[in-house]
Image (tube, rainbow, N blue to C red):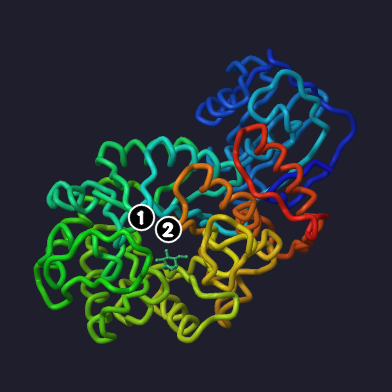
Amino acid sequence: MASVIPAPVLHLEGDGSFDLTSTSTVGGEPAVAAYLSDVLGLELGNAHPAIELVIGVAPSPGGYTLDVSATGIRIEADTPAALFAGAQTLRQLLPPDQFVGVTTATVPATHIEDYPRFAYRGAMLDVARHFFTVEQVKRYIDDIALLKLNHLHLHLTDDQGWRLAIESWPGLTGIGASTQVNGGGGGFYTQQDYADLVTYAASRFITIVPEIDMPGHTNAAISAYPELGDGAVEPYEGIEVGFSSFAIRSEHTYEFIDDVVREVAALTPGPYLHLGGDESLATTDEDFRYFIGRATAIAAKHGKTLIGWHEMGRSDALPTGTIGQYWSFTTPQEGAAEHTLSFVRQGGRVIMSPADVAYLDIKYDTQSPLGLVWAEGPTSTRSSYGWDPAAIVPGLGEAQLLGVEAPLWTETIVTMEDVESMAFPRIASVAEIGWSAADRPRDWSEFAERLNGFGARLDAAGIRHTPVPPSDAP
Ligand code: TNX
């Protein structure tokens, strides 16, 4: 059986096969046809195409059917995004050496019916601790698209840097973007760069989720505008968390938030805007709750559904429907379950990112050259596969979950090779947990077999990944 990740809902093998060659054509729905013809190196053509992409019926909303028979390959879905998911499955049905360009490939006859478990399947990239260029982020977009992830959360601001130009507050990307962890030039996206990323992500059916973190994690903003905090501060190049806070009782702070959110919302066609709220250790509880009430009310006015890290649930004045992002462990730490359930009480749902299994910046093993260990680390690929999002917080089941997300914080991550080797293959575990059916048995050695096949395809595409150790081999 071919090794598809995430595992499809139904995958049957038929008799016979279909031969793709370099002269085969791709036709049908134009956006996905253009993508497939590009990545497979095949011509477009609508007269009896070898690969036909059809908008029609789906086995379930957001799903697709894929058939390979002696006469050709056909994917049918209810939306272009679902056809794109089917196109990723097709790529994985080809031999590994044909993953980035078809010369000749025998594809076994197959019938697949497939649809996602959760609507939100995300990755997060921290571009604040270390800056990543537009080209690097585009590459990561291509990488995560392989796994049917459909949201990229960009952590755009933190103590070490503010990475998105805000026209009404230009100093943010002056001194505020001048450095990063351990020094170096820092960097930022112009609004044009950001718009370019949004458009590129949309071509892979990925929604960008911008995060502007507050009231903590704000040293970079305060270095540019000292009145936003408690006076002048230097740019920060360390990796401590929890020392900065906006001035909570100053109206100026809320004028700033209004301006920033207005500009970010205008640049963001997607429905979500993430306002952070994590690790505000330099803000009293009373001030934190006052701040979250005010900041979220201002932000909601700009028409976005807000997302906050689970601590934001300490406030009971959230705009209706605000989404919580859980980042405690698979055994919730003190307060985390209660804060997370608060989002549900206020009409929202939850994205699960349990740090001890879903954080991509935690070391794989004690020998890993990169990464942190604070979240019960190391986290092996095997442990990244061994959890269920609906079995962590009592009271938070399938219906209360919007989805899952794998965050990559970049205190120790500098290059694209670093990004890929930390993400892959653990991000494949999170993608499968987010996509494949909840009642599908999760068996490590069966998954590890499929990872071998996926790893061969990553090799063909030049995407770095960390090998599964022999002790966990299938
Ligand atoms: C915790 S998780 C953070 C980040 C760090 C990360 C490192 C969360 C919401 N905040 O500020 O970068 O740990 O793993």
Q: Is residue 458 shown left or right of residue 135?
A: right
Q: Position of residue 336 (x, y in %)?
A: 47, 81
- Any mark on residue 443, and which? none
In the image, 444 versus 119, the foreground residue is 444
Q: Position of residue 133 (x, y in %)?
A: 37, 40
Q: Position of residue 136 (x, y in %)?
A: 44, 39
Q: Is residue 324 above or below residue 409?
A: below
Instruction: Evaluate whether residue 254 shows in this view.
Output: no
Question: Could you say which quadrant of the image residue 370 lies in?
Answer: bottom right
Q: Which residue is mark 1?
A: 182
Q: Is residue 385 above or below residue 291?
A: above
Amino acid on which the number 1 mark rests in the picture: Asn
User: Ligand 1, what quadrant?
Assistant: bottom left
**Residue in the image at 18% along x and 51% along y:** 175
Q: Is residue 290 above or below residue 90?
A: below
Amino acid on which the number 2 mark rests in the picture: Glu
**Residue in the image at 17% along x and 48% along y:** 174
Q: Which residue is mark 2?
A: 411
Q: Give the mark nearest the N terminus, 1 or 2.
A: 1
Q: Does any atom of ligand 1 lie closer than 8 Å to the CB of label 2?
A: yes
In the image, 347 versus 372, the foreground residue is 372
Q: Secondary structure at mark 2?
A: loop
Q: Is residue 184 shown left or right of residue 173?
A: right
Distance from disc 1 to disc 2, alpha carbons, whole Å, reads 9 Å
Instruction: Evaluate whether residue 157 shows in this view.
Output: yes
The residue sitting at the right extreme is 15
